[in-house]
Amino acid sequence: MVLSTVFVVGYVIVLIVVAARARTAREYEDFSVARRALPLSLIFGSLCATYVGPAFSIGFVGRGCRSGLLFLLIGLAYSLQNILVGWLVAPRLRELKGCCTLGDVFGQKYGPRCQVLAGIISVLLCTLFSAVMISAGGVVLNDIFGLPRWLSVTAVAIVTTSYTAFGGLRASVITDAYHFALFALLLPGILLYELLFHLDGGLTAFYQQAVAATTYGFETTPLLEIVGFVTAFFLGETLIPPYANLALASKTTVVSRNGFVLAGLFSALWFTVMIALGIVAKPFVPAGTGEDYVLLTLVKATMPHAAYALLLVSLVSIVLSSLDSLLNAGAVVFTQDILRRFTARQDSAALIAGRYSTVAIAAVAAGIAAFVPSVIEGLLVCYKIWAPAILPALIFGLWLRKPRPLAGILSMTVGTVVPILLQLEMIFPTDVGAVLPALVCSLAAYAVGHCLHGLFQGGSNR
Amino acid sequence: MKFGLLAIVILAAAVVILSGVWVAVALIRAVWHVDQPASSPPPDAPDRPAQ
């Protein structure tokens, strides 16, 4: 028990030291894009720390236990997406001059109305994502200290907001690196310990468990559901605001490209480790254990109490590292794409606005956190809206020589409304999830807007 | 096949740990040098022509 307390207190002290050393952001460019001076190692660490949230850690271990390698194959869609973004999109984003957010990109390509619209969608999504993360953090703190839910949710929100509001992107990236180093050492360490000391039956047993779980996974998961998962993993988190901000804050275009490519490759390795932990856990987990409790049950059953405390510390770090990036991205987007269009045009005013926005988004997200049903469900809601709302207009905007504003506005509007209606089952029920149908509608709206704009312009020129 | 699966898992775990070490080293450097931001050249400097 003493050792557990030492681990938790040690983690908090190092976090405070790292956050304090990250320096207070004194200028808006520091707060929003860390002066565009972030090196490859920090971009890579921050990207990985942001996407490795509760779903990609405890969620994947649970899925590995239930369906073996099936979710590793599904997860590879996410790895491929990161590699493609790094190869094709991130360098193009970094090349654009004077962009702090995706909204700035929309503003340069489609005009100010699209920038505001992209800003509103981004802020809403960042707030929803943050609510999911705060809720997950609350559950972990509740497990460690037995605090009431409202108190643990408040504690997670206050701790993260305190360093993100003052240090901006740089503080978020530096603390992400700390959190990343922590869980990238601890969780594979747990796996190697289990393989060395608790693999009853040896190599053959591990292989047989993997084959049995994978066969069960394929037999019990319908093909359309697999397609829905692959689509959600491939598109759902593509260039969400924290990732886009990191692409824009990279030192050079090469750093931007390599950061995403390496993060994609890392995700494949990470999923392998998580799924393997799930397979190893199978003999230790009683039937009926919830998927989210497989990792906790494994560590409780096979490791000393101090290791359990270490695991909980790494789970807190997994949550905080995702949350701080989301809060910073949401605040920068709100300030840059919405406030600065109408007010707070000076850098000093924008910096103050950015700090207040961080606090406001955290407060709203903490309020919503009480209503988040589960981590995975909450994330899926966000995924289904982001890809159709933003990606078609962004990709066409980056590649077309003269993208047309009406196409952007129509695509973003349809891409936001259709997935919401689909989730509320107000249009028609689908088995492949809302992403694919909504994406098709968004692409169609883009094509219609592109043609209509051309017609109007042709008419007005005559 | 059996050995291959375990080898991939162990290799993946080792690379994840090495990534953690790499980022930890970068973190220590970043925290160590944080008080001298002016010592690092501006990010776009190499792209600019010499005056």
Image (cartoon, helix red, strand yellow):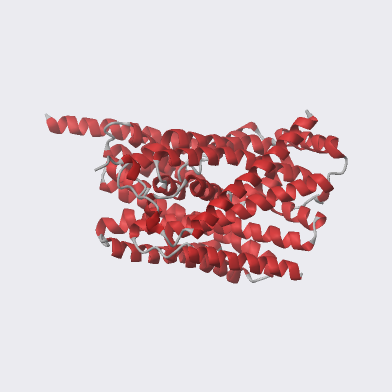
Question: x%, y% of residue A332?
Answer: 38, 56
User: Measured along the vertical axis of the image, is residue A52 above or below residue A437?
Assistant: below
Q: In the rendered view, does A280 fall on the left or right side of A233? A: right
- Quadrant of residue A302 in the image? bottom right
Give A147 or A398, whichever is nearer the viewer.
A398
- Quadrant of residue A351 in the image? bottom left
Question: x%, y% of residue A173?
Answer: 49, 55
Image quadrant holding the N terminus of chain A, namely bottom right
Residue A132 shows up from this direction: no
Give A417 or A309, whichever is nearer the viewer.
A309
Give A444 or A34, whichever is nearer the viewer.
A34
Task: Name the residue at the right extreme.
Answer: A201
Residue A377 shows up from this direction: yes
- Residue in view at x 16 percent, y 31 percent: A459
User: Measured along the vertical axis of the image, is residue A431 above or below residue A177?
Assistant: above
Q: In the rendered view, does A248 fall on the left or right side of A269? A: left
Image quadrant holding the C terminus of chain A, namely top left
Q: In the rendered view, does A179 fall on the left or right side of B33? A: right
- Residue in view at x 70 percent, y 58 percent: A311
Question: x%, y% of residue A315?
Answer: 64, 57
Task: Name the residue at the left extreme.
Answer: A462
User: Measured along the vertical axis of the image, is residue B5 above or below residue A287?
Assistant: above
Give A407 or A301, whichever is nearer the viewer.
A301
Question: x%, y% of residue A455?
Answer: 22, 30
- Residue in view at x 36 percent, y 64 percent: A26
